[in-house]
Image (tube, helix red, strand yellow):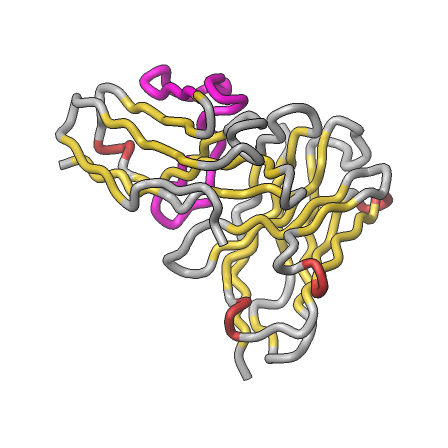
Amino acid sequence: QVQLQESGPGLVKPSQTLSLTCTVSGGSISSGSYYWNWIRQPAGKGLEWIGRFYPSGSTNYNPSLKSRVTISVDTSKNRFSLKLTSVTAADTAVFYCARGWAGDGGWFDPWGQGTLVTVSS
Amino acid sequence: QSVLTQPPSVSEAPRQRVTISCSGSSSNIGNNAVNWYQQLPGKAPKLLIYYDDLLPSGVSDRFSGSRSGTSASLAISGLQSEDEADYYCAAWDDSLNGYVFGTGTKVTVL
């Protein structure tokens, strides 16, 4: 079955760019049936959707993060990436990648295990 | 900036039934299907209910979902200790043109 795995630095300095990658196995990221999403969760808090990428090239971003976020896909390596610029301590969170159904409902399944990113000098 | 409101916590004895509400607006729940996620302690969220009331393969039929107007609810019957987790509702929001999650509800089995 499809599995997702996040990877990237666990520590990022304030004002720098956070970069994470999600590697997809067991299925093609080019499938037109799915979006590829990033979601984050600060410690002890709820889930926040960051944005998504569709294989056609279209993207949607959370309006509160839109000016700082870029999600891109590398189909040759079957993975997609997140870049979040000008980070502050408020961006410290566990970051999850998830596959999203592209039809009505848009549920997320499966999810990666998550990776903790701390913003600190 | 959750736009879907859930009770912070619910608790009940084993074998009883609990219901978790999820309140939204016409731009999200009022016009789009609701999905529910279960997050066990220290784990990634897992899809629990999709498209309002459908169960993914492998999910116990003790879980059920419904949607009416601008609200949705998740019910857990025959409560078990393994159900202790955080539960989140979620839906697409047409005004934000993005996906929104609920504030989350912690379920405790007494």
The residue sitting at 29% across, 46% down in the picture is B8
Segment colored magenta: B38-66
Rendered location of residue B50, percent (x, y): 52, 24
Placement of B6 over or under B55, stated as above or below: below
Query: Residue A42's spot in the image, x, y percent?
Result: 46, 60
Between A31 and B32, the one lying in front of the other is B32
Left or right for B66, reference A55:
left
Q: Is residue A119 above or below residue B75?
A: below
Where A116 falls versus B94 (above or below)?
below
**From this viewpoint, which residue is outermost toward the bottom?**
A121
Q: Please name the residue shown 70% across and 65% down the image.
A: A68
Taking B34 as reference, is A63 left or right?
A: right
Q: Nearer the viewer, residue A117 or B68?
A: B68
| Quarter of the image with the C terminus of chain A in it | bottom right
Farthest residue in the front direction?
Answer: B26
Taking the spot 70% from the left edge, 57% from the top edge, the residue there is: A82
The quarter of the picture where the N terminus of chain A appears is top right
Count of numbered badges drawn on the protein: 0
Q: Position of residue A47 (x, y in %)?
A: 48, 49
| Residue A58 is inside the magenta segment | no
Quadrant position of residue A2:
top right
- Residue at 72 percent across and 46 percent down: it is A60
Overall secondary structure of the magenta section? loop
Image coordinates of residue A36 in percent, x first then y, are: 70, 41
Task: Determine whether A82 is above or below B56 in the image.
Answer: below
